[in-house]
Amino acid sequence: MELIDIGVNLTNKRLRYDVEQILEEAHQQHVTQLIITGTSMEHSQMAIDLCNTYPEQLLSTAGVHPHDAKLWMENSPVELVNLAKQNCVRAIGECGLDFNRNFSPRDQQVDVFQQQLEIARQIQKPVFLHQRDAMDTFVTLLKEYRDQLNAVVVHCFTDDKQALYQLLDLDCHIGITGWICDERRGQELQSSVKDIPPDRLMLETDAPYLLPRDLPQKPANHTNYPKYLPHILNTVAYHQGKAIEVLADEVLNTTRHFFNL
C-alpha cells in the first residue's frame, strides 16, 4: 500500500524542525510522498527549499491563504508566478476565502483569490483551495474561472452535503482530513463521503492541525503528523463500505493524476 498526503503544513513551526523524523515515520506507515501547503509567499519559498532538500519525498503548492490576503502586494503576482515555475510546485494555493475568522478584510480576500485563480488559469496548474463560511461567494467566483482552470481541489472539506454536491457539479476534487474521524463534528461528512466518486477523492492530514479525535494513542503534544494518514484512510473506507486496499489504490491513482506525478 502506498499513500500520498496532499496537505501538510510542513513549514509550520511545530513541524519544520523535525522534518527528517516526520518523513521517516510517515514512510514507515506507507506514506511515501507529502505535498507541502504554501500559505504565504514566505512559506511557499520555505516549502520549495524543503522540496529541494528532500526531492524524492516532497512536493509543494505555492500561494497565499485568505488569512494572509492583507499581505498581498503589488508585486505579489509576479513573485507567485516565479515560485510556481519551480518543478516541485504542483498547484497554486492554498488560496480561497475564510469568512469565519476574517483575519484579512473580506474584500481583500476576494481580490487576492481572484488574482490567484487568474494566475492558475494563465500557467495552467491546478488550484488548491480553502473555504470556510464563505460558500456562496466562493462558488460564484469559482464558476467564473472553472472552465479555464486545469484542475481544482477543495482541501479539508468539512461542509454539508449540499455544498459537496455544488463542488462536485463544478468538477472539483475533494480533500478529506481527520475531520471525518470526529464523532461530534464529522457526522455529516461520515454520511456523505460515500457520494464522492473515486476519481474525485484525495486524502490529507492538514498536519499539524486536525489530529483525529479517535486515534487509539494520541501524541502528548497533540500534534497531527502525516504518519496518521492511514488512520484517515481506514475511516473513509469504513464509511464508503470499501476494502482499505481498494480505496488506497483509488486515492493514489487520483492523486497522481491530479498533481501530475
Image: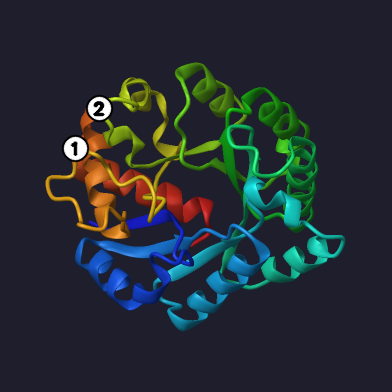
Residue farthest to the top, as pictured: 162
Q: Residue furthest right?
A: 74
Q: Position of residue 12 (x, y in %)?
A: 47, 64
Residue appearing at x 39%, y 64% in the figure: 14
Between discs 2 and 1, the one toward the N terminus:
2
Report the residue that reaches farthest toward the bottom: 53
Residue at horizontal 67 percent and vertical 28 percent from the top: 139
Q: Do the residues labelled 2 and 1 touch (CB within 8 Å)?
A: no
Q: Which mark is residue 205?
A: none
Figure check: 101 above or below 191: below
Q: What residue type is labelled 1?
A: Ala
**Crowding near pointer 1: few (<14 within 10 Å), some, many (20+)?**
few
User: Which residue in the structure is indicated by mark 2?
Assistant: 183
Q: Is residue 16 left or right of residue 230?
A: right
Q: Which mark is residue 243?
A: 1
Q: Nearer the viewer, mark 2 or mark 1?
A: 2
Assign the N terminus to one quadrant of the image: bottom left
Q: Is residue 93 left or right of residue 33?
A: right
Q: Which residue sits furthest left?
A: 216
